[in-house]
Amino acid sequence: MTVPVHEYDPQEARSLIEEVSERSGQNLLACYQCRRCAAGCPVAEETEYVTPDRLIRRIALGDREGALTNELVWRCVSCYTCGTRCPNDIQTARITETLKKMAKEAHLEPLRPRIAAFHSAFMASGVRWGRVNEMEFMGIYETKTALESLKRMDLKAVAEELKAQVDFGLAMFKHKRMHMGLQMAKGRKEIHRLKKKAEQRRGK
């Protein structure tokens, strides 16, 4: 098995770690690779053992491609176990969220399209109404995943997903865990303003 070699560039390394640290609000330079986070990461087996410490190491070495295109960015479940175990309180979940945004800005294809669609649908509904409306949120998500399957002409996958979600939705509704009404929060204009401000800042 051939392992790609990363050429260390001090300037690129400094630029990347400063950008991720600023955007995530985490002090990545405080990581001294004790690997306590790795010992508690519940998705390590699903990420080809790219654990939080390994991800931070890639950033510290200036490996932008390796940081933006790895399974942990998309598989992280934001359980915050890593931050709880970290002696320096580094919350890797905030780092993976930052890297998701950076990957999107770089127009990189998400390694897990379904996770990207879920994230996008959640944000769209939350920003629009000030809180997530389940029916709208799941409708957007299912539409995105169906279109992705249709691009591959995988009609069987579309049918199976539709049936699975209808069955699941009916079961949730039966147990009064699915809310049909439209719920709105006060201060939606403020949420829209904050979103616009964040987009303008990102565009600088």
Image: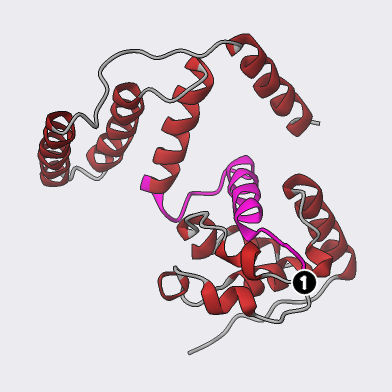
Q: Quadrant of residue 9?
A: bottom right
Give the x, y percent position of residue 186.
56, 10
Q: Residue furthest bottom?
A: 1
Give the x, y percent position of residue 196.
68, 20
Q: Amino acid at mark 1?
A: Cys
Q: Nearer the viewer, residue 113 or 72?
A: 72
Quarter of the figure with the C terminus: top right
Q: Residue furthest front?
A: 175
Residue at 27% over, 33% down: 142
Residue 198 against residue 100 in the figure, above or below: above
Q: Quadrant of residue 52?
A: bottom right
Residue at 47% over, 73% down: 44
Give the x, y percent position of residue 103.
60, 48
Q: Is residue 40 magenta?
A: no
Residue 55 against residue 98 in the figure, above or below: below
Residue 82 against residue 188 in the figure, above or below: below
Its colouring scheme is secondary structure
Residue segment shown in magenta: 88-114
Task: Indicate left or right for 113 with 56 as reference.
Answer: left
Residue on which the image places disc 1: 31
